[in-house]
Amino acid sequence: MTWAEQVSAAYATEPLADTTPLTVDVEAAGWLQAVRTARAALGCEFFDFLTAVDEQPHGFTVVAHLVSLRVGGVDAVLLRTRLPATDPSIACVCGEFAGAAWHERETHEMFGIGIDGHERLDALLLPDDFAGHPLRKDFVLASRVAKPWPGAKEPGESDRAASPSRRRTRPPGVPDPGDWGPSATPGGGDSPARQG
């Protein structure tokens, strides 16, 4: 039986077509059971990562990448679920994979997604008094509030292609490419690299 057939049988659904790794969409209420199924039925003993994506205004997508290591190969499945934009939460999977604890704490801290049943959702990467969730798309960048962008436009909005560019210079001590390396010309001059 192929890996795709095993995944299809385990979840009673077809994985998304043309995805690597095989991706399975599951209901948020069945998140913990989906992870248990990956471990028990598919032999996914390796927890790679868990994270979220802010799909504003449609809520969040939480993904977990689980891997089955076997002699002669590696198979993986990406479990994915959608959460609402208001009061998003998901079941803790630390009971199945202890290594998920750090990933769940990070997802909680950066996206504000509740992890039901997690024993320790205190600050992991941010200061204790930090307000907000910095990986949400509605999070205001403090640097833009404290000091507005110096240009007339935000990065990526300029008409730089129409503007003349300045002359490109090499840093001090870097010889001309014609003087050294595979594209060097014979008798390339008196550069420091050729002396001595």
Image: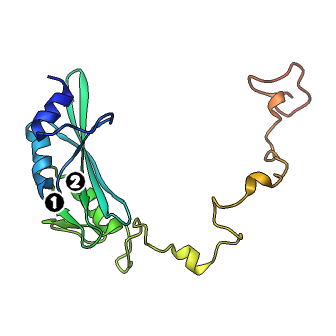
Number of labels in the image equals 2
Disc 2 or disc 1, which is closer to the eye? 1
Circles 2 and 1: CB atoms closer than 8 Å: yes
Q: Is residue 33 above or below residue 178?
A: below
Residue 34 coordinates in the image, percent (x, y) = 13, 48
Q: Residue furthest top?
A: 186
Residue occupying the point 8% across, 39% down: 40
| Earlier residue among tags 2 and 1 | 1
Identify which residue, 54 or 132, lies in the foreground. Answer: 54
Identify which residue, 181 or 91, lies in the foreground. Answer: 91
Q: Is residue 44 left or right of residue 186?
A: left
Q: Is residue 86 above or below residue 17?
A: below
Identify the secondary structure beneath mark 1: loop
Residue occupying the point 78% across, 47% down: 171
Q: Is residue 76 left or right of residue 150?
A: left
Q: Is residue 2 above or below residue 36?
A: above
Identify which residue, 1 or 186, lies in the foreground. Answer: 1
Residue 49 coordinates in the image, percent (x, y) = 28, 49
Residue occupying the point 48% across, 74% down: 140
> Which labelled disc corresponds to residue 100?
2
Q: Is residue 12 left or right of residue 89?
A: left
Q: Callout 1 environment at 10 Å: few (<14), some (14 to 19), or many (20+)?
A: some
The residue to which callout 1 is attached is 92
The quadrant in which residue 59 appears is: bottom left
Name the amino acid, label 1.
Cys
Name the amino acid, label 2.
Ala
Q: Callout 2 environment at 10 Å: few (<14), some (14 to 19), or many (20+)?
A: many
